[in-house]
Image: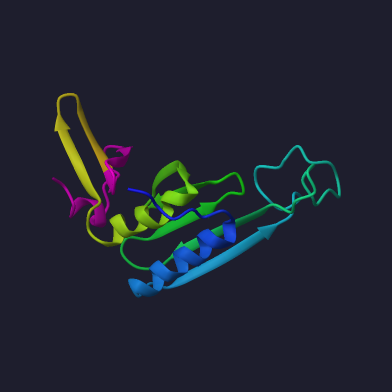
Amino acid sequence: MRRPHLPTTESAVTAIREIAAEYHLEITVTDDIGVDRTSRRTSAGAFTVLDADGSLPHEAFVELGGAPPVTIQVFPEDDARITVDGVEFADVPRDAVPAFLRSVYGGLAHVKERFFPPGQWLVVPLPGDETYKELLFRGALGPWPAGRIR
């Protein structure tokens, strides 16, 4: 399944705002614009604002209120870091962020348990057989993931 392309950080934030409205979630957005403000540009020289190609990088940090609490850090490099109730999913493609959030808030995300080898994973399925999984640490299962064990 093809997802809509989100060419910029701002387009991703707009898509996240639409999902927040759809699920009646509170949203807070913090924008960092410029090489001197974005988190991955630590090698930039002093007082440097533009990238070497003359572009102005834009990074956004988004907090969604509700159950579960979700934060999204959208990077200028076409990826995002999504944290769902304390569980971090790194390197999620920017184009996959809306589908990821719809899976979480639409009730498709779940916790998978195995007895051997023992472990619990937060599983977020996306359309088109794409799935994101992150290992949960023992004792770190909060009320939201505990209610989604399969």
- Above or below for 67 versus 38: below
- Above or below for 142 versus 89: below
- Name the foreground residue: 39 vs 3: 3
Instruction: Judge left or right: residue 95 versus residue 45.
Output: left
Instruction: Judge left or right: residue 147 versus residue 139.
Output: left
Magenta span covers which residues? 123-150
Structure colour scheme: rainbow
Residue sitting at x 48%, y 55%: 72
Instruction: Judge left or right: residue 95 versus residue 77.
Output: left
Image location (x, y in percent) of residue 26: 42, 73
Q: Does residue 139 appear anywhere in the picture?
A: no
Residue sitting at x 27%, y 43%: 123
Q: Does the magenta-highlighted stretch encompass residue 108?
A: no
Furthest toward the top, the residue is: 117
Q: Quadrant of the C terminus?
A: top left
Q: Does residue 109 appear anywhere in the picture?
A: yes
